Image (tube, rainbow, N blue to C red):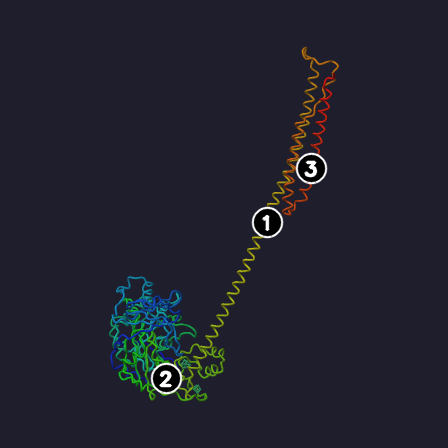
Amino acid sequence: MTQLWDFSGGIHPPEHKDISTSRPIRNAGVPDYLVLPLQQHIGDPAEAIVEVGEQVLKGQKLADVKTGMGVPVHAPTSGVIESVADFPVPHPSGMADRCITLKPDGEDQWCQRNPVKDYRSLERDQVLHIIRDAGISGMGGAGFPTNIKLRPPRDRKVSTLILNGAECEPYITADDMTMREKADEVVAGLKIMAWILRPERCVIGIEDNKPEAIAALRKATEGTQTEIAVVPTKYPSGGEKQLIQILTGMEVPSGGIPADIGVMCQNIGTAVAVAQAVLEGTPLISRVVTITGEAVREPGNFEALIGTPIEHLLEQAGVNQDAVSRLVLGGPMMGYTLTTEAVPVIKTTNCVIAATAAELPAPPPEQPCIRCGQCAEACPMELLPQQLFWHAKATEFEKAEHLNLFDCIECGACSYVCPSSIPLVQYYRFAKGEIRAQQAEQLKADRARERFEARQARLEREQQEKELRRKERAKAAADAAAKKQAEAEKAADEGEAVDERAAKSALVEQALARKKAKAEASQPPAASAQPAPSAPPAEQKPDIEALEKQLSQAQSKLDTMQGMLDDAKAQQADNVEKLERAVAKNHDRVQRAEEALSEAREKLAASSAESQPTH
Ligand code: SF4
Ligand code: SF4
């Protein structure tokens, strides 16, 4: 026997469930057209991957989410794509959104399916991929992608897996009938999810007003360790946080998720969809929808293709249009009034109430709050609905947030008990919507600021890199100039040395020549070649060749230095002055060499003239 806890608050509204449980689930058939919204889940909308006019098969993927969170949308039957356009979708605002319209061809021809009977032979990631590819998102709440939910953060081990069969809201019996008629599939889906998560405990929580479902599931779980926990009927025991508290005694922390306390809750319909996806290879293309209310003659549950217009289901249930006063999508507590019957069944559609005026009369006019406190007593989240109402009405959203507005599950229990008929939940929805819009605006502004700052940082970085490159270039130029200068100085020094060596060499050569001449002069004259005794001693002749070489070298050096000076001036280098001095020095050197050569030539010419015989 499973130990149970209670949650605070809660109410006991009339159930009206037996209206729709007297008949088995009926097949709603194929309507004239199917409207498939691209956004049926939390996350990013899917993108159409088919063209208008394209023939598609049943189960074929029509739209997918390429990046981000989301699941694909499939063709519920074979047919032709008629349009991809805006169409009214189920939403409290009555808004239109992007939808694929499919015209059935009556063939109902399946695409290739790939059932996996022995899923345990696959990797867990592969099974999660199958679940994702089958387009499964939560079928009992906001439509969170199931494959993502089944992959909790690594640091949060799921020790308890709960299948939520409470279905506490009046009128709705889709899960009840599913458990009665598809108990084996429910349990098969639970087993697959348990295999993925490896929890220590699996529990199916069912309210005690569903004895047939309880019996069916007890039978289906015979021999397994899955617990069937029968919980007292009290609204909203089917709320995720409330059921967790009932079955575990633990509370999900404010702003947290069940995985924070090691628990995960899945819906009955979701379990069936998981079983069909894995074991049959069938994507999520239909679901059970309760069509009820006193304005339909044959209320009950229908297996309806996703995309089936509500008006088609109402016809199947024998709607008496004259009797319909209000059409409610969902239950009377958390649902909303439909503005058109043209909206389609989507993955989260569980009930439509075609209510007569007597059944769901228009709410009486709102009266001032009398501070009776009944709303606080009824609140299952232990909030302060009265104060939340004041702040929401006064648009004091920050104060409402401080009172944990976002913990409100919008169960409507407070509105239900309010003697002043204040539509409290509507105020909370308004406040939440405004806060989300402000947050979205803030996020937009933050992103714009971040983009601006990133751009500024990029420009600064580019500027710094540019400056660095400029400095490197300048340094390289300075280094090259310094090197050139050093080379020039070295060359100047070497040039000087060469000149000096050349001069010394010339002098040595001259000295040797003199010595040789002297030695020759001291030799006794040969008989045949004796000079005349009156002839003066031979005077040393200047070495013209050596002096010409010296001049040529000095001239060459001067040219080199002049070229370097011109370059340095063009580059405005630091060594211009030094080079100018070197050039001047080399000029002097050239001049001296020219003078020496000229003098030597004159001397040579004079000595030649003297040695000429006179006639
Ligand atoms: S139940 Fe209604 S009247 Fe009473 S305190 Fe709450 S809001 Fe005010
Ligand atoms: S709608 Fe919100 S405030 Fe009202 S009872 Fe439910 S949880 Fe509490």
Q: Residue 9 versus residue 50: which sits nearer the camera?
A: 50
Q: Position of residue 468 (x, y in %)?
A: 57, 54
What residue is shown at x 37% (from left), y 84% (from top)? 11
- Amino acid type assigned to the residue bearing label 3 in the image: His
Work out how far the residue at label 1 is from the one at label 2, CA to CA, in angstroms. Answer: 83 Å
Quadrant of the image containing the N terminus? bottom left
Residues tagged 3 and 2 counted as in contact (Cβ below 8 A): no
Q: Position of residue 32 (x, y in %)?
A: 29, 75
Say which mark, if any, is on residue 587: 3
Bin the neighbour count of mark 3 within 10 Å (Cα to Cα): few under 14, some 14-19, many 20 and up. some
Query: Badge 2 is on which residue?
Result: 11
The quarter of the displayed image where residue 231 is located: bottom left
- Amino acid type assigned to the residue bearing label 1 in the image: Lys
Res 166 visible: no
What residue is shown at x 36% (from left), y 88% (from top)? 361
Res 84 visible: yes
Q: Residue 474 versus residue 80: which sits nearer the camera?
A: 80
Q: Residue 198 versus residue 551: which sits nearer the camera?
A: 551
Closer to the chain start, of discs 1 and 2, is 2
Q: Ligand 2 is in which quadrant of the figure? A: bottom left
